[in-house]
Amino acid sequence: MGHRGIDGFTLDVDGVAVVIRTGKYPNGRPSLYLEDTEGQMYAVVSVNIPECPLEPGEFFIKDWSENQWIARLVWETGLFVNTGKVARGEWVSAKAWRIKNG
């Protein structure tokens, strides 16, 4: 998914500077994650739902459980648009976000 507009965008998470990174899951689906400034994984913000279609620049956000507050901070960057698409699973529903201008 690599997107120059957001890759490397830094935000503060409870006093820790983290960097937004885009990538791909092993099956080629887009991913979004956070690293600390030393390149260590801080959190995976996306969720891989291969059976649900996505358009270019879209990914499914994991905004429940331990990711609820992190997803909110990522949303507040203003870098993303909620597409209105929802992937419904047995236990959770995941919203599809799109990178603005992506």
Image: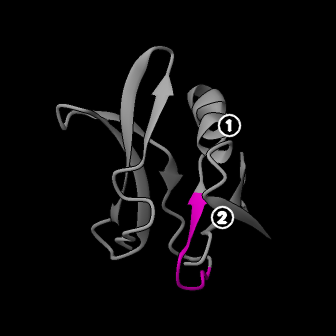
What's the distance in space between the residues labelled 2 and 1, CA to CA? Answer: 12 Å
Q: Quadrant of residue 38?
A: top left
- Which residue is nearer to you in this view: 5 or 44? 5
x and y, in percent, of residue 81 in the image: 71, 64
Residue 5, placed above or below residue 15: below
Magenta segment: does it hold 81? no
Q: Residues within 10 Å of mark 1 (few under 14, many from 20)?
A: few
The label shown at residue 72 is 1
- Which residue is nearer to you in this view: 45 or 91? 45
Relative placement, left or right, of 27 versus 14 is left
Q: Quadrant of residue 82?
A: bottom right
- Residue drawn 61% across the image and 46% down it: 77
Please tell me whether mark 2 sits on a helix, a strand or a loop: strand
Relative placement, left or right, of 84 versus 27 is right
- Can residue 73 be seen here? The reply is yes
Relative placement, left or right, of 90 versus 71 is right
| Mark 2: amino acid | Trp
Main SS of the magenta segment? loop
Please tell me whether mark 1 sits on a helix, a strand or a loop: helix
Q: Residues within 10 Å of mark 2 (few under 14, many from 20)?
A: many
* Residue at the spot of label 2: 97
Magenta segment: does it hold 54? yes
The label shown at residue 12 is none
Considering only order in the chain, which callout, 1 or 2, is on the residue closer to the N terminus? 1
The residue lying furthest to the top in this view is 15
- Residue drawn 54% across the image and 78% down it: 102
x and y, in percent, of residue 95 in the image: 72, 59
The segment highlighted magenta reads 53-60
Residue 4, placed above or below residue 73: below
- Residue drawn 62% across the image and 35% down it: 73
